[in-house]
């Protein structure tokens, strides 16, 4: 199945999975003193970052100031990956992380965190009951990976999110699903329970080699669906 332009804004049920594509032009950007942040996805979809009532959130940021202080987010865990430039994250009385492109750091949102350096980054924020991993992939020509090999428990929910960072990519899963993802887009697979067989993701570059980041978000045991 090739996903058409008309289907992209809908949730598509396919082979027991729910699939949604969020195009870059449909994402919301907010400016702040040190740069700009673009919200790519938030769950539940009617949740609000400002009200801090979300379970998880994916965003990307362009940091223009040489030094900035991150917003305090008590109750949330954070993953941050540099995608352009170099950053130094200084967590007060904790640790310091030096991030070059596609390096990442994990930290508590309640910590006092200062960022030094300009560039772009990718952020995942997680509320109680959720965990996440970010995996960068360099697609020189084509690339294949098997995901969800063991899978979550049968009564749990997970999300596989695909984000092309610096170019366009043709994404396919199995033999029947194919879509071109453009730079800045986000594709979300919602997986209920444990798949009967591993998902197979394939990437083919459209033009020059590009980086794709796959974000896996899982509901932990005992978390709310």
Image (cartoon, rainbow, N blue to C red):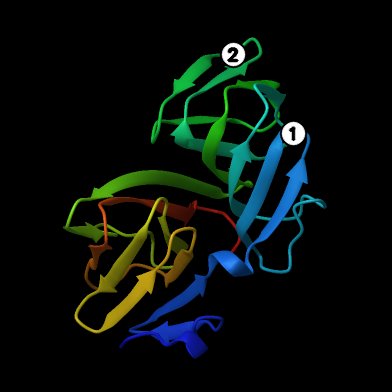
Q: Quadrant of the C terminus?
A: bottom right
Q: Residues within 10 Å of mark 2 (few under 14, many from 20)?
A: few
Q: Nearer the viewer, mark 2 or mark 1?
A: 1
Q: Residue at x 30, y 51 (%)?
A: 210
Residue 25 in the image: above or below residue 174: above
* Position of 221 relative to 14 (above/below): above
The picture places residue 24, in percent across and down from the top left corner, at 55, 64
Mark 1 crowdedness (10 Å alpha carbons): few <14, some 14-19, many ≥20: few
> Could you tell me which residue is drawn at 17 percent across and 57 percent down?
141
The image shows residue 16 at horizontal and vertical percentages of 37, 82
Q: In the figure, residue 191 lies in which quadrant?
A: bottom left
Judging from the image, what secondary structure is the residue with disc 2 in?
A: loop
Q: Position of residue 169 (x, y in %)?
A: 32, 64
Residue 201 disc label: none
Helix, strand, or loop for circle 1? loop
Residue 142 position by quadrant: bottom left
Answer with left or right where residue 131 lies relative to residue 149.
right
Instruction: Tell me if 65 is positioned left or right of 172 in this view.
Output: right
Residue at image coords 49%, 73% = 21
In this figure, which residue is indicated by the disc labeled 2? 94
Mark 2 to mark 1: distance in Å? 17 Å
Q: Is residue 41 left or right of residue 8?
A: right
- The residue closer to the viewer here, 56 or 28, is 28
**Tag on residue 71?**
1
- Can you say whether 54 is above or below 83 in the image? below
Can the viewer see residue 24?
yes
| Mark positioned earlier in the residue sequence (2 or 1) | 1
């Amino acid at each position: 199945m090739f996903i058409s332009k008309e289907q992209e804004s809908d949730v598509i049920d396919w082979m027991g999975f729910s699939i949604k594509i969020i195009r870059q032009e449909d994402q919301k950007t907010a400016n702040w003193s040190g740069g700009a942040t673009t919200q790519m996805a938030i769950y539940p979809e009617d949740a609000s970052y400002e009200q801090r009532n979300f379970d998880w959130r994916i965003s990307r940021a362009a940091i223009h100031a040489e030094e900035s202080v991150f917003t305090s987010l008590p109750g949330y865990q954070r993953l941050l990956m540099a995608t352009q430039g170099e950053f130094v994250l200084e967590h007060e009385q904790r640790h310091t992380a030096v991030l070059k492109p596609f390096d990442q750091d994990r930290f508590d949102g309640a910590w006092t965190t200062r960022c030094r350096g300009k560039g772009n980054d990718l952020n995942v924020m997680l509320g109680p009951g959720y965990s996440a991993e970010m995996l960068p992939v360099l697609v020189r020509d084509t690339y294949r990976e098997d995901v969800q090999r063991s899978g979550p428990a049968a009564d749990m929910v997970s999300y596989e999110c695909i984000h092309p960072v610096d170019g366009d990519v043709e994404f396919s899963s199995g033999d029947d699903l194919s879509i071109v993802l453009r730079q800045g887009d986000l594709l979300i697979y919602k997986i209920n329970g444990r798949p009967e067989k591993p998902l197979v993701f394939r990437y083919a570059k459209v033009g020059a080699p590009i980086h794709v980041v796959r974000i896996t978000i899982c509901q932990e045991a005992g978390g709310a669906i």
